[in-house]
Image: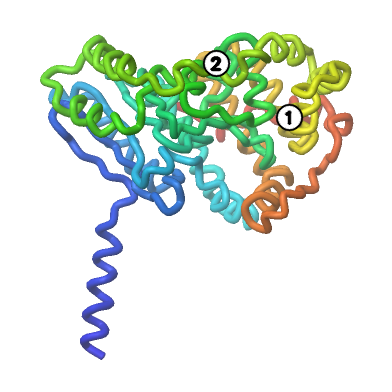
Amino acid sequence: FSLFLCSFRYSTVVLHLIAIVLLEKVGRAGVITMNRPKVLNALNLNMIRQIYPQLKKWESDSETDFVMIKGTGGKAFCAGGDVRAIAEDGKVGGPLPVVLFKEEYILNNAIGTYKKPYVAIIDGITMGGGVGLSVHGRFRVATEKTLFAMPETAIGLFPDVGGGYFLPRLRGKLGLFLALTGFRLKGRDVQRAGVATHFVESQKIPELEKQLMGMKSASTEDLSRLLDSFQSQSTLDSEKPFVLENHISDIDRLFSSSSVEGIIQNLKADGSDFAKKQAETLARMSPTSLKITFKQIQLGATLSLQDVFVMEYRLSQACMRGSDFYEGIRAVLVDKDHSPKWNPSTLEEVSDQSVDQCFDPLGEKDLKF
């Protein structure tokens, strides 16, 4: 029994030693490595609480020139936030939906307003919460393994983590299209869309990281030159056109409307295979989420990053009060039947008043920086 107890104690210690986030100083670089490969480095509250204070520490440390963030496991940078845990806690009136969204957006804002260069190596799946950890930084390096999407309208949510800021700033109506449909961009297309700043082949990433961490001084210009040089050596898929190249003018035309209903009408009237496919995709999404997202992107186009996070925090809490988020998580992640029963079930039943209420200030409970 004592031998068993001893081995049990030892295994417990080992479990604690396996950090979910690795934070280390290498040369002039502060390096953040997300270390939950089995769950595709999904972001949870514990990770946020480890990353944020270290990020602030490095920001004022004269020995640190820049920060680099990456993920382990080879499959994902970060596949999103731990939405299942949020749903489970929210259902029983727990504090996680309040706390996690608040602290996550504060972290996202810290990245967006960081005084030093921030380099995200988005090699692999980068969705939702992973986008929030990368897209607001100065440099975002995609590889052929990068898979980017904001698929929140399929789970009764909206493209948060600052989606209301960066999506409307992509060319034309591309951001609105990505926000409503959850369309997936891969590899070089992530850079072509404007989500990534650079494209480097994944086999060159270890050498890139080595050179980044070996820099004697690392100004924004120095980092830019090094990333540019690695990009110029990466010719993979360079001859392939942007996946949406033939549809950019269609997207601008079809997604130009003053309402989601108007967009659906445009798609149905167009009749092309591309338009039909988008109409089918939107028909599967939460009608409430589509309307919230449409307004979020409209308003976000003129707001500062901080104001976008204040708005998105209000929206997150509105979604927690509703039913579609819990139903979306059930359908996609729990039962996996992919047949959500949205309530309301049609766009026409989602009133402008109910959408507007989601954007109402929360008074004392509002997000503050």
Q: Nearer the viewer, residue 358 or 159?
A: 159
Disc 2, SS: loop
* Residue 74: % across, % down: 37, 43
User: The disc labelled 2 sits on which kind of residue?
Assistant: Pro
From the viewer's perspective, is the residue at label 2 or at label 1 nearer? 2
Is residue 267 visible to us here? yes
Residue, far left: 216
* Residue 246: % across, % down: 66, 13
Residue, far front: 239
Residue at 81% x, 19% y: name it. Answer: 272
Q: Nearer the viewer, residue 331 or 163?
A: 331
Is residue 44 visible to us here? no
Disc 1, SS: helix
Q: In this figure, which residue is indicated by the disc labeled 1?
A: 290
* Residue 79: % across, % down: 49, 41
Q: Residues within 10 Å of mark 1 (few under 14, many from 20)?
A: many
Residue at 42% x, 31% y: name it. Answer: 133
Q: In this figure, which residue is indicated by the disc labeled 2?
A: 241
